[in-house]
Image (tube, rainbow, N blue to C red):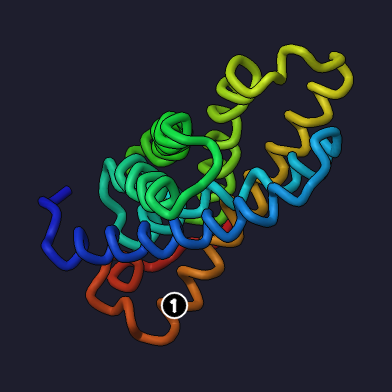
């Protein structure tokens, strides 16, 4: 792989900032959910993974998922989200989870399956933080299993398929013609 180009770095940061703003709006909606509505909380989890899938899917560079999630988490934090610095830990572990999916395929496979896997792994990585830091360990085993399964599906759909669809739609406009997403044929799975 060649080195990062300045336009790729700029696009990555801009998209991560936009995702951070989306995350902050999602935080407000999430706060409206009753504390015991674990299934609904799980459904919402996946959206916080979009930067870690959309950005690397567009620029196709190692490290893009991790950096995008960290920048988005920092923007969300600066906009006043409710989790404080733990939010940066979330960005780090979600970015690592997302990055692993692309790493598994040597940063060569960019399709629906890889994007869904990236969203799932980001969500799976977050499950560790949820369990140890956010009280998941105190819930009944059945509730834990349901929350994890629902969160993984949400990661696949909202965190993987949605950002891929958004990036593909953006690519069809021609706005991404100078980026890897437009230069390489996108394989469908």
Determine if residue 38 is in view: yes
Left or right side of 34 for 16? left
**Residue at (51, 47) in percent of width and height:** 81
Q: Residue at x 51, y 53 (%)?
A: 50
Q: Please state which of residues 155 and 77 is positioned toward the viewer in this rendering.
A: 77
Residue 145 sits in which quadrant? Answer: top right
Question: At which x and y percent is residue 142?
Answer: 89, 19
Secondary structure state at the residue bearing disc 1: helix
Q: Quadrant of residue 184?
A: bottom left
User: 72 or 123: nearer the eye?
Assistant: 72
The residue drawn where x is 17% and y is 48% is 1
Q: Nearer the viewer, residue 71 or 3?
A: 71
Q: Is residue 104 visible?
A: no
Q: Residue furthest bottom?
A: 173
Left or right: residue 131 compared with residue 174: right
- Please determine whether, in this image, residue 18 is positioned above or below residue 127: below
Horizontal relation, residue 150 to residue 22: left or right: right
The residue labelled by disc 1 is: 170
Which residue occupies 58% across, 19% down? 133
Figure check: 43 above or below 126: below
Residue 79, above or below 154: below
Q: Residues within 10 Å of mark 1 (few under 14, many from 20)?
A: some
Q: Position of residue 112 (x, y in %)?
A: 56, 55
Residue 10 horizontal/vertical position (percent): 21, 64
Based on the displayed image, in which of its 4 quarters is residue 186 positioned?
A: bottom left
């Amino acid at each position: 792989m060649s080195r990062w180009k300045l336009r790729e770095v700029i696009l990555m940061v801009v998209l991560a900032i936009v995702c951070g703003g989306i995350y902050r709006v999602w935080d407000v909606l999430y706060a409206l959910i009753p504390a015991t509505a674990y299934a609904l909380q799980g459904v919402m989890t996946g959206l916080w993974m979009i930067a870690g899938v959309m950005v690397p899917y567009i620029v196709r560079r190692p490290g893009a998922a991790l950096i995008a999630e960290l920048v988005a988490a920092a923007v969300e934090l600066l906009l006043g989200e409710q989790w404080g610095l733990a939010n940066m830990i979330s960005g780090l572990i979600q970015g690592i989870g997302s990055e692993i999916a692309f790493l598994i395929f040597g940063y060569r496979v960019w399709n629906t399956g890889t994007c869904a896997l990236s969203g799932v792994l980001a969500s799976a990585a977050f499950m560790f933080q949820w369990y140890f830091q956010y009280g998941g360990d105190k819930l009944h085993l059945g509730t834990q299993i349901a929350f994890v399964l629902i969160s993984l599906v949400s990661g696949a759909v909202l965190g993987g398929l949605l950002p891929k669809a958004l990036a593909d739609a953006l690519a069809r406009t021609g706005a991404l013609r100078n980026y890897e997403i437009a230069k390489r044929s996108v394989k469908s799975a």
